[in-house]
Image (spheres, rainbow, N blue to C red):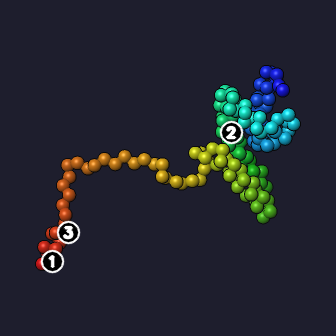
């Protein structure tokens, strides 16, 4: 298997690659001795690595946000329709990934079911039923 220093170096490489936008599948295919299930086992066993991994995923979302901006900046002054469509597709994919990695920042769900409203009863007011008054005035 791996020695302690090799394992720490491997973890550092995984964190670095994720921060730089690589998927776990790409990282594992690059390293023939590594499988995604082994990474998940490491995440379950090592709390420090798990914390670093979570932060790396957050950084990965920022990577994709910056990538969207760079895609726009890389367009020529007068882009062709094909260049615009390619940029739009790239941005849509990057938005999707960023929203899944960091939904509170980049998500588009406007679901308000988790919003708590603190309603206090109104005190000091008398509620008058005006429906009786209108009926009496009509007679």
Element marked by disc 3: helix
Q: Residue furthest top?
A: 4
Q: Is residue 52 among what the camera can see?
A: no
The residue identified by callout 3 is 131
Element marked by disc 1: helix
Q: Residue at x 72, y 36 (%)?
A: 40
The quadrant in which the C terminus is found is bottom left
Residue placed most toward the observer, 117 or 95 = 117
Q: Quadrant of residue 131?
A: bottom left
Give the Cα distance between marks 1 and 3.
11 Å
> Mark 3 or mark 1, which is nearer the start of the sequence?
3
Crowd rating for badge 3 (residues with CA inside 10 Å; few <14, some 14–19, many 20+): few
Q: Is residue 133 left or right of residue 42?
A: left
Q: Residue furthest right?
A: 32
Q: Residue 57 got which mark? A: 2
Give the vertical position of 47 relative to 104 (above or below): above
The quadrant in which the N terminus is found is top right
Give the Cα distance between marks 2 and 1.
70 Å
Crowd rating for badge 2 (residues with CA inside 10 Å; few <14, some 14–19, many 20+): many
Q: Residue furthest bottom?
A: 139
Residue placed most toward the observer, 36 or 133 = 36
Where in the figure is residue 82, as x and y percent of width and height?
Answer: 80, 62
Q: Residue at x 72, y 53 (%)?
A: 93
Q: Residue 138 got which mark? A: 1
> Mark 2 or mark 3, which is nearer the start of the sequence?
2
Q: Residue at x 79, y 43 (%)?
A: 25
Element marked by disc 2: helix
Q: Are marks 1 and 3 in contact (CB under 8 Å)?
A: no
Q: Residue 98 got which mark? A: none
């Amino acid at each position: 298997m791996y020695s302690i220093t090799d394992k720490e170096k491997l973890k550092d490489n995984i964190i670095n690659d994720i921060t730089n936008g690589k998927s776990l599948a790409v990282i594992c295919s690059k390293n023939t001795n590594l499988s995604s299930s082994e990474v998940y086992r490491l995440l379950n066993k090592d709390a420090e690595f798990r914390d670093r991994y979570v932060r790396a995923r957050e950084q990965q979302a920022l990577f994709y946000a910056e990538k969207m901006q760079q895609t726009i900046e890389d367009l020529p002054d007068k882009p062709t329709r094909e260049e615009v469509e390619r940029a739009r597709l790239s941005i849509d994919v990057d938005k999707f990934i960023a929203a899944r990695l960091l939904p509170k920042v980049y998500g588009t769900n406007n679901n308000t079911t988790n919003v708590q409203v603190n309603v206090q009863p109104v005190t000091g007011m008398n509620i008058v039923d005006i429906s009786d008054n209108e009926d009496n005035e009509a007679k």
